[in-house]
Amino acid sequence: ATAIFVLALAALVPAAGVSAQTEQARIRVVHASPDAPNVDIWVNGSVAVSNLAFEEATDYIALPAGDYDIAVTPTGGTAADAVIEAMLTLEGGMDYTVAAVGQVAEIAPLVLEDNNVAPSAGKSHIRVVHASPDAPAVDIAVAGGPVLIENLAFPTASDYLPVDAATYNLQVRPTGTDTSVLDINGFVAEPGNVYTVFAVGLVSDDSLSVLPLVDATSTTSTAQAPSM
């Protein structure tokens, strides 16, 4: 899917109405709709990503800053079959994640601005996205330890949290409780890396799971900013 995305978007750049000299932005796409079929992602009227499945994500792709017409259809459909249509403005120097979230009857785009600034020495940055449409607001906690993120509701993302580079056993809990509805054991936070972790699936059919993504590594993070 990523290779198709690269080739299609390269062909679409002139249609975006921006100069090749314009500062670049980066975008990736995540399929996080639990009951939606595989999908095609359309950019400016042409298929840019084909057959993206639930719990799959493209890599980041660089594009000139500008306005893009984004649509999502079931794989093999036409533009008239779009279940999501949105205009997306990409600003130069910014990274974005666009996720298809919600059950198919209420599917919608969740557009996130990504902060891939390099963590401080010995640290990682972790962001969590609540993408389970029937799950209540949740807390993210270290098993046997502190709560890291409080009261995260669907469909929102936490801020990036700086943590010590280490291996963690994490729990997803209904807000204000000590009961784990999803254990994330052995999550390795490498020094210098930036992560986004999607909580996906449904509580009702016991399919709740996590989709961890590496946003940046110690060699690809942008220049370090003041400590978060």
Image: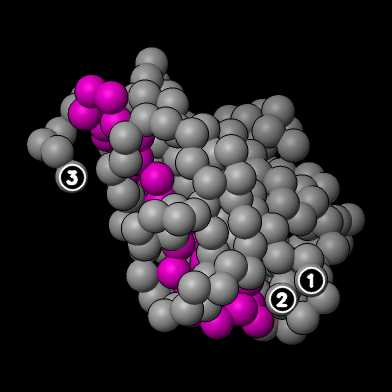
Quarter occupied by residue 37 = bottom right
**On the picture, is 113 further left or further right than 153?**
left
Say which mark, if any, is on residue 228.
Answer: 3
Q: Mark 3 vs mark 1: which is more N-terminal?
A: 1
Q: Is residue 152 magenta?
A: no
Three-letter code for the amino acid on which mark 3 is drawn: Met
Q: Residues within 10 Å of mark 1 (few under 14, many from 20)?
A: few
Q: Is residue 126 magenta?
A: yes
Quarter occupied by residue 10 = top right
Pinpoint residue 94: horizontal percent, then vertical percent.
32, 42
Residue under label 2: 203
Task: Tell me whether the residue at label 3 lies in contact with that at label 1, contact meaning CB atoms closer than 8 angstroms.
Answer: no
Q: Nearer the viewer, residue 41 or 121?
A: 121
Distance from disc 3 to disc 1, alpha carbons, whole Å, reads 35 Å
Residue under label 1: 206
Q: Residues within 10 Å of mark 2 (few under 14, many from 20)?
A: some
Which element carries disc 2, helix, strand or loop? Answer: loop
In percent of the image, x 53 and y 46: which residue is there? 169
Residue found at the far right of this picture: 76
Figure quadrant of the N terminus: top right
Which contiguous range is marked in magenta?
114-140
The image's colouring method is one colour
Figure quadrant of the C terminus: top left
Q: Nearer the viewer, residue 221 or 120?
A: 120
Pinpoint residue 127: horizontal percent, then vertical percent.
41, 51
Which element carries disc 3, helix, strand or loop? Answer: loop
